[in-house]
Amino acid sequence: MMTQYRSIKRQHEDALLFYRMGDFYEMFYEDAKDAARILGITLTARSKGAQAIPMAGVPVKAAEAYLLKLVRAGKRVAICEQTGDPKTTKGLVDREVVRIVTAGTLTEDQVLDTDRPNWLCALLRAKGRAGLAWLDLSTGTFLVQERADSQIEDELGRIDPAEILVSEHEQPEREGEPLFPGIDAPVHPCPAFDFHVEECEKELLRFFSLKTLEGFGLAKDAMPLAISAAGALIRYVQETQRHALPHVRRIEVFQDRGRMLLDRATRSSLELVRTQREGQREGSLLSVIDKTRTPMGARLLRDRVLLPFTLLDEVLSVQAAVMEFFIERSIREQIREQLGSIQDLERLSARLSCGRALPRDLTALAESLSRLPKLHELLEPRQSPRLAALAAAMDQLQDVRALIQERMVEDPPNQVQNGGLIRSGVHEELDELRVISTRGKDWMLRFQEQEIERTGIHSLRIGYNKVFGYYIEATHAASEGRVPTEWVRKQTLKNAERYVTPELKDFETKVLKAEDRIKEIEYELFTQLREALAREVARILDTAQIVADVDVAASLAELAVERAWCCPKVDESKTLLIEEGRHPVLETTLRSEPFVPNDSDLEPPGKSLLLITGPNMAGKSTYIRQVALLTLLAQIGSFVPARSMELGLVDRIFTRVGASDDIARGSSTFMVEMTETANILNNATEHSLVILDEVGRGTSTYDGLSLAWAICEALHQDLGCRALFATHYHQLTELADLMPGVHNCHVAVREWENEIVFLHRIQPGGTDKSYGLHVARLAGVPGSILDRANQILDELESEGESIKPLAVHKRSQSREAAYHPTPRQLNLFRPSADRLLDEIEKLSPDELSPMDALLKLKELRDRYST
């Protein structure tokens, strides 16, 4: 046996080998040591002494949970099954690897998050371009795209893959660095040949049984890198899964037209699907708006949050469907009741296609499909064009449901090999064998009663085990002197003896043959049914998408009713008006005090940039994030937490919020801040919404203030987009007097008995107070430190340093020229007298000639004169 094991293991050196032995998967040698360490299971040994082989095992019934732990630890697992029948095989049972489990190829519901896809990605880069393909094997969704290489990390961040395939030649920029910093997914290098475009095209044509890929929108001369990535991905999936994948029906070329691309910084700072600090779903926007009742609906809502609509027709279409459900309470509740009984049709379909669907998967599918007629009945009269179209397109699949219900029992066991799956009346021989089996059990009861009466051993009973088959058991005390001569002793126990008789062995042969044949027939009928259902997967998946769309609309309506949200007016203007807006997450999660609503008013060109000042903890960051989140909600067709809202569609939302180092990339806080700001200035348009928080604070005061000033000028004069800029640089409030589209507001604070009270209310006008020492006291900074800080503050303020803003820079009409200024540091403000004194103190008069001294004096006068 170990010879067979070693032979199979040599073919899968890069994976742990789960070697099937009866009811366990066993591992040996280093595999066993690794598994014992990761899984916390016992490490034993096969044989003893010098020949001892490390060994560890997991039960087959519990294998899925162990697989998940191993995959999350970065391992690949090769599943080696017994392909021969131990009952009929003489000698060693044949075994072979039937599947290799990796992070990106999991399909089991028990180990996957229901509300997010499990993407396997493949990536190929060349000459500044990159091809990307991503497949969710658990649903069959398969997409590709080509992009500039510089955009790929943002795309990977949005897709959030479980596993990434790359060419073996792909290397990080610096040795020892991760290939994709910030992407938490194992990277698997594949042979470079797997990405050869000619071979990849052939691979895809074979897989989809096509003569050309142009029907998918994939032309080799137009998207060669995407074809290479897709072909390499399909080859990898076929090598790991080793069976047909009919649920993977087509490739979709990812189109960002009509969808809003959100960069990594924006997704992170707005905490759309996970929180920044813990990286958890709880506390994210998605966690508080997700009222979906189906896994498909949850995944679709997540997709829309990460890719909001930018086409007005699409926004209004979803909004109208939400509005109808919002108004029609009874219909909404009935629809959500039906949806609540529909299982994950997409992942059920995938397991059907892969031949892994279990008996209860089939009955769950039948139960889900039984809800479709009522769902269709409720949808058909709807007035919303979107809901009416969904109802018209819905395949109710009642023939598929009938096929299952006609053959399967209502509550089958979940193991295929043990029988008890198929209804009576489906198969004539099966029914006959069941009669034999049932009568056999009746015979056994009669035989037991007969032997008790014949022998007088009242404790006698008939039992069965896999070693001896059927036997008679009688206690020593009761059977002494009463055992008939035809009883043959088979086993002695502590208090009893076990016997067999010729009559009992004849019975055993008949019954066991019948029961074995029953299991064999039931298995055959089940696999035939599973294969028949696999041929209907395309129809099931189409219906699953319709159900998901309905679920999202009903979910958003339920959310709006529950939270008293309003329907925003959305058009193609540049308006952004919010009356009494609230933060969608904080109003839900912070229940200790009522959330303070605030208004927002932006309408270029007269009011395009809002400068928000105020102390820390007052709510500046919350307010600007709130505006961004309400904009995003409106553009997925949702209602919003406000009294009213008017929104002109935005093409992008950009945020620069928070400060942290990017250790994986070797970038400081300020470098991260400037990189994200540069991305905004280079990619935002007049239709974008820009959110900036404390830009410039990562460097010295004068550098930071200069940059913040110049960035405000760029937003106002070059871009003309809607922007909110929260800052502690109170000098920036002067911009409102110099640029007509800039307006000041501040977060109100009340001073009372040397205390401050944060009112969290946005009010017009700027402020010149930061209350930093008050905030420090609230944070627990020691009193002695605060006393000293107050002294220093009094001294600094007594200097009365004057700050005089320069006139607004006349910016070039060319954005390129505007963002490539002369290398000289901008001198926007008059420096203090201290800086002049510092320069004078550094001079050495004895080393200067009279002429040099005069020239230096002129230089200082020119530099520091008012």
Image: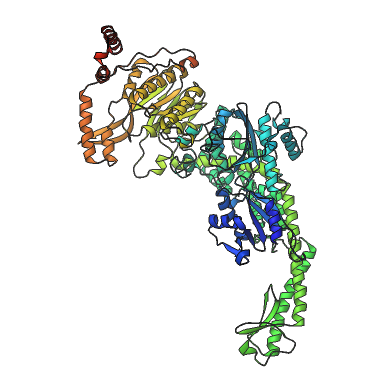
For the residue pair 556 and 30, the one nearer the viewer reads as 30
For the residue pair 50 and 796, the one nearer the viewer reads as 50
Residue 182 relative to residue 125: left or right: left
Residue 480: quarter of image: bottom right
Taking 475 as reference, is 382 above or below it?
above
The number of numbered discs placed on residues in the rendered structure image is 0
Q: Quarter of the image containing the N terminus?
A: bottom right
For the residue pair 820 and 68, the one nearer the viewer reads as 820
The answer to whether residue 509 of the structure is visible from this angle is: yes
- The percent coordinates of residue 204 (x first, y second) are 72, 37
Residue 115: quarter of image: top right
The answer to whether residue 643 of the structure is visible from this angle is: no
Residue shown at 62% from the left, 26% from the top: 127
Residue 565 relative to residue 314: left or right: left
Q: Residue furthest bottom?
A: 481
Residue 513 relative to residue 787: left or right: right
Q: Residue furthest top?
A: 851
- The percent coordinates of residue 209 (x first, y second) are 77, 38
Name the image colouring.
rainbow
Taking 11 as reference, is 521 above or below it?
below
- The percent coordinates of residue 866 (x first, y second) are 27, 11
Q: Residue furthest front?
A: 847
- The percent coordinates of residue 107 (x first, y second) are 63, 48
